[in-house]
Image (cartoon, helix red, strand yellow):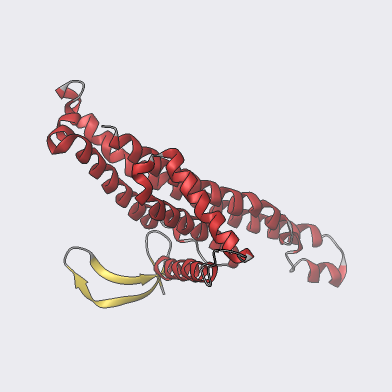
Amino acid sequence: MEVNISGAKIFYTFPFECPILGKFQITETLVVSWIVMILITGLCIFLTRDLKVENISKRQALAEFIVEKANNFVLGNMSEKFRYMIPFVAALFATSVVSNLISLIGLRSPTADLSTEAAWAVIVFIMITKEKIKAGGIGGYLLGFTQPIPVMTPFNILSELATPISMACRHFGNILSGVVINALIYGALAVASSALLGLIPGIVGDVLAKIPILDVGVPAVLSVYFDWFSGCMQAFIFCMLTTMYIQNASEG
């Protein structure tokens, strides 16, 4: 089993090769991403079954609560004309949250692979560019790179390209750092457990030193921040930046 530059395992490489994209590979990130999509799709089907107008179930109440929060988030940060963005932002947030939290069940988070956030950022960048062209036309969009003076054109182009790069790297860096820190904590506690329990004389100490007792409990407490809080917060920030950038682009 191979490992690519992002650290994700490569399960299968197709024999044919694309001249532009190179070899087609099924990686751990791709497999877990499909699992995330299946989980979200299954949850949506479960929550939207047997919808009623009156005497709604708790399941339907939860679905309506989620929809209401998505509506308020998008319309509150953008405007009524961007109502069509609600499904996209909601799907982006759900995918990010589930991808971040799936590491809790032992799977490698797809967001710990930069290619995932890069794909999201490219989509958002295309939407931002579309709004800028829609607001000022192609000529106005290109002319904007020469403001306030033509000599600033290269810097304005770099600033434009920095938007998707910064969005992707910010999300990726925070998630990957959480994965790395958790791994270091597990390793350090295992070593500490072996050293402390190894001080017990006799066969009892020899047996207990091989059991990473300190790995029980402490990492779970720390994962409340690194997995739950940080994962949800990064998804929120990415969606917040998405709505803000698109809103600002529409204003010209």
Q: Which of 119 and 239 is in front in this view?
A: 239
Instruction: Return the x and y of residue 130 as percentages of the image width and height.
Output: 23, 44
At 32% from the left and 48% from the top, the residue drawn is: 124
Q: Quadrant of residue 31?
A: bottom left
Between 61 and 238, the one nearer to me in the picture: 61
Q: Is residue 27 left or right of residue 149?
A: right
Image coords of residue 19 (percent x, y): 16, 66
Residue lying furthest front? 54
Q: Would you say residue 174 is visible in this rendering?
A: no
Report the residue at 45% width, 54% height from top: 90
The answer to whether residue 34 is seen in the rendering is yes
Which image quadrant: the N terminus? bottom left
* Image quarter in which the C terminus is found: top left
Q: Which residue is drawn at 15% across and 34% down?
A: 142
**Residue 166 x, y percent position in the rendering:** 37, 41
Nearer to the camera, 200 or 6? 6
Residue 144, by quadrant, is top left
Residue farthest to the top, as pictured: 149
Q: Can you give x and y, in whole percent of width and height, for residue 137 in the image?
A: 16, 37
Residue in the image at 16% along x and 32% along y: 140
- Report the side of 27 relative to 99 (left or right): left
| Vertical comparison of 102 with 138: above or below | below
